[in-house]
Image: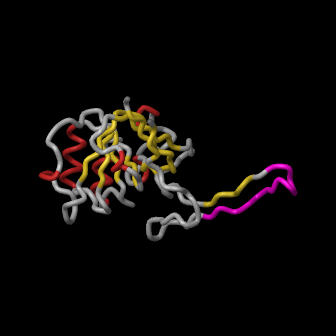
Amino acid sequence: MIVDLSLPLGEDTLVYPGDPEIRVRPWAFIDRDGYYMNSLKMGEHSGTHVDAPAHFIPGGKTVDELPLEKFIGNGLVIDVRNGEGPVKLDEIPDSGYYDRIVLFLTGGRELSPEVALFLAAEGVKAVGTDAMSIGNESVHTILLSGEIPIFENLTNLEEVLGTEFVFIALPLKIEGGSGSPVRAVAILEE
């Protein structure tokens, strides 16, 4: 079974305050042009997306420079919706993170720098959240300096909570991109 973890991408999709709004405009029509196509205008971090190191790290790898293996792996969802403030170390399990893509079901909470440091030290492949942002500048810097991609604005994480699944969220190959929209999915093992 495949679970879609991506938000719809359109003009009603919320963007991070200050980011470019999403614009979808008809470009060609079947009755006029013989084919249908839209023109898109948006920031790299629109909708469900991934942050590459270059987003916060001077000289960091851009989204087109990261190996595709960073965007595919065994997923784990951690539910931290019942807490308050930044997610603290005592709210998450103390092991089982190595080479996994760890996704947080937060209800809008952000990670603390301590959690980011712990996850980086544990050798996670990538980290994600259902929130618009994984955390403050320190959290981004900690993860991205270790070339740990950050997935933001994920949805439907409660559908894969407590299951074994493969997470896939491939970015567009944007030359020099600080990030990219992704189509994130969880493939559940049967």
Residue at 53% x, 47% y: name it.
176
Residue sitting at the far bottom: 18
Residue at 47% x, 50% y: name it.
6
Residue sitting at the far left: 90
Residue at 53% x, 56% y: name it.
8
Q: Residue 134 in the image: x percent, y percent?
A: 33, 56
The figure's colour scheme reads secondary structure
Q: Nearer the viewer, residue 43 or 55?
A: 43
Q: Is residue 112 left or right of residue 70?
A: left
Residue at 28% x, 55% y: name it.
139
- Quadrant into which the C terminus falls: top left
Magenta residues, as a range?
Answer: 23-35
Q: In this view, does 33 lie to the left or right of 36?
A: right
Number of dots carrying numbers: 0
In reply to whether residue 34 is colored magenta, the answer given is yes
Q: Nearer the viewer, residue 63 or 16?
A: 16
Q: Is residue 4 left or right of residue 100?
A: right
- Quadrant into which the N terminus falls: top left
